[in-house]
Image (cartoon, grey):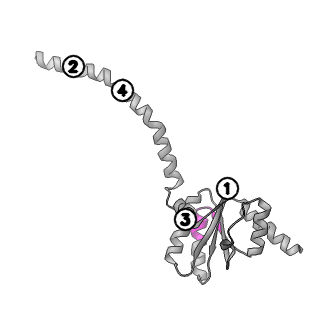
Amino acid sequence: MRPEKKFLVQEVSEYLGKSDYVYFANFVGVTVAKISSLRKDLRDDGAECHVVKNSILKVALDGMGCAPLDEKCFEGHTAIITGGSDPSGVAKILFKFAKSNEEKMAIKGGVLSKNQFTIEEIRALSELPSLEVLRAQVLALFNTPAQQLVRVLNAVPQGVVNVLQAKLRRSE
């Protein structure tokens, strides 16, 4: 392999190494202004969008030990989206952008933790609540038994107080 191609493979491998996921998108016909807008939205979420050659991408993915990918991921022009700590949030951004640019941008697939994800699986991931909401829901689940225990323990003394107050009202 020529040194230029080795450099490109190394560069793409660095992009892929920034997170445990990568999404593939076809962006043919999308204007520069719209791609810049997408990149800004992704940057706000900690992700990046890069256009790469399919042959270089295949070599970089093979070097990382990813599962074999469907050839549809390598058809046409390919943009890779990586980075960010919330794959669900990045998927939401991509599907929102793809919806507003239906004819021009299409999500082709992705890889999450070295496993191939289909478009349907990425769509399901994008419909999940954000990472912060999921964390709050888990914390609420942990907190619920403690709240119920406090209510049960508080019920006995509260019942005694209620009986004493009723007794005082009757005697007055």
Distance, label 4 to label 1, CA atoms, is: 44 Å
* Whole-percent x, y for residue 155 in the image: 32, 25
Q: Which residues are magenta?
A: 39-48
Magenta region, mostly helix, strand or loop? helix
* Residue 32 located left or right of residue 8: left
Q: Estimate the x, y position of residue 106 in percent, counting from the top left.
A: 58, 75
Camera-nearest label, 4 or 1: 1
Task: Point out residue 47 in the picture as x, y percentages from the top left corner.
Answer: 63, 64
**Which residue is depicted at the point 67% across and 77% down?**
75
Which secondary structure lies at badge 3?
Answer: helix
Instruction: Give SS at disc 4.
Output: helix
Residue drawn 75% across and 64% down? Answer: 61
**Mark 4 or mark 3: which is in front?**
3
* Dot placed on the residue nearer the N-terminal end, 2 or 1: 1
* Tag 4–tag 3 contact (CB < 8 Å): no
The answer to whether the residue labelled 2 contacts the one labelled 1, judged by CB atoms less than 8 Å apart, is no
Residue 44 among magenta residues: yes
Tell me which amino acid carries mark 3. Answer: Glu
As drawn, the label of residue 152 is 4
Q: CA distance from mark 2 to mark 3?
A: 60 Å
> Label 3: which residue?
120
How far is disc 4 from disc 2 in space, using C-alphas?
17 Å
**N-terminal-most mark, 4 or 3:** 3
Residue at 83 percent across and 70 percent down: it is: 7
Quadrant, the C terminus: top left
Q: Indicate left or right for 160 with 109 as reference.
A: left
Question: Which residue has dot 1 on it?
Answer: 113
Q: Is residue 47 left or right of residue 61?
A: left
The residue that mark 2 highlights is 163
Seen from this angle, which residue lies furthest top? 171
